[in-house]
Image (cartoon, rainbow, N blue to C red):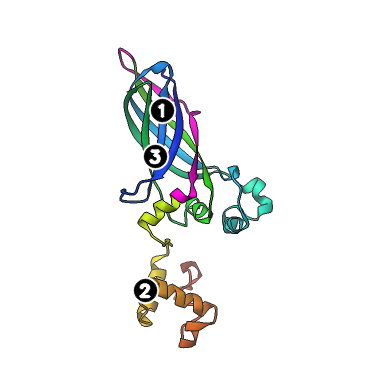
Amino acid sequence: MTELSFVCTGVRADRYAAAPTLLFRLKISAADGARVHALALRCQLRIEPARRDYDAEETAALADLFGARSRWGNTLKPLQFAQVSQVVPGFTGESEVDLPVPCSYDLEVAAGRYMHALRDGEVPLLLLFSGTVFSGPGGFQVSPVPWHKEAECRLPTAVWREMTDTHFPGCGWLRLPRESLDALLAFRSRHALPSWEATVAALLAAAEGSGPGSRGFPSAVVRPATERTAP
C-alpha cells in the first residue's frame, strides 16, 4: 500500500473559467519516493466556522445560519462547501496539482450565505480526501486513499470576492418561484421601470411607505406562493 500525504499550499480564483471556480494548489507526496502511476482523487471541502473570529457586523449577518451569538457554542457546526473528483497524472515521490472547485453564489445555500456575510480575513476550510491509488515500482498495485487523509486551508475572503466579481461584478443572485418572477415582470412592465434594480427599489420604497408609494405602487405586490389562497 502506497502511503500518501496532502498539503494545500494556496488557493486562487480561476479568472478564465466559464463559471465561478477556485483553484486549490495541492502538494501530494508518496512515502519513500514511491512511484504512483495515477491517482483517482476525491475531495470533500468543509467550512470550519468555529476556527475564526467574527466582528459585530458579521455576527449579525450570520444570525440566520447560527442563531444568536450566545448559542454559537452549540450551533457553530461545519458547513459542506463542495465535493469534487480529479485524476492526478503519474508521478514519483511528489507532485503539485491544481484542484478546480466550482462554486455557487446562491444565497439559498448555507455556504453561499456564510461567504457573503464575511467582510475580511480568511475562511477556514478542511479538505477531506479519499480515492484510489494505482502504484507499484515494477508492477501494478491498487490501494485506497485512507479516509483519515486531510489538509487544512485558509481561503482569503479577498480571493472569494475576486472570483465572484469576475463573473457577477457588484451583483448577487436570488432564487424565486416562477409565480413571483411573473408577478415581478408584470409589475415592471405596468410601471415602465427600466431595470430589475429599479423594480426592486420601487417595491422596497413602497413597502416602507415612501417615494414610489405616492405614485400608486401597492404596499405588497408579490407574496410567497405558500401564502396565496387558492381561487
Q: Is mark 2 on a helix, strand or loop?
A: loop
Q: Where is residue 19 in the image (x, y as percent from the top left)?
A: 34, 51
Which residue is disc 1 drawn over?
28
- Contact between labelled residues 2 and 1, with CB atoms less than 8 Å apart: no
**C-alpha separation, residue under disc 1 versus residue under disc 3:** 16 Å
Residue 70 located within the stretch drawn in magenta = no
Q: Residue furthest bottom?
A: 215
Q: Is residue 113 positioned above or below 3 on the image?
A: below
In the image, what residue type sits under mark 1? Ile
| Left or right of residue 51: residue 158 | left
Which residue is disc 3 drawn over?
84
The quarter of the picture where the C terminus appears is bottom left
| Left or right of residue 3: residue 40 | left
Which residue is disc 2 drawn over?
195
* 95 vs 223, nearest the viewer: 95
Residue 154 located within the stretch drawn in magenta = yes
Q: Residues within 10 Å of mark 2 (few under 14, many from 20)?
A: few
In the image, what residue type sits under mark 3? Val
Q: Residues within 10 Å of mark 3 (few under 14, many from 20)?
A: some
Q: Is mark 1 on a helix, strand or loop?
A: strand
Q: In which quarter of the image is residue 209?
A: bottom right
Magenta span = 137-159
Q: Is mark 3 on a helix, strand or loop?
A: strand
Q: Position of residue 174 (x, y in %)?
A: 43, 62
Number of the front mark, 1 or 2? 1
Q: Position of residue 130 (x, y in %)?
A: 43, 30
Number of the front mark, 2 or 3? 2
Q: How crowded is mark 1: few (under 14 residues within 10 Å), some or many (20 or more)?
A: some
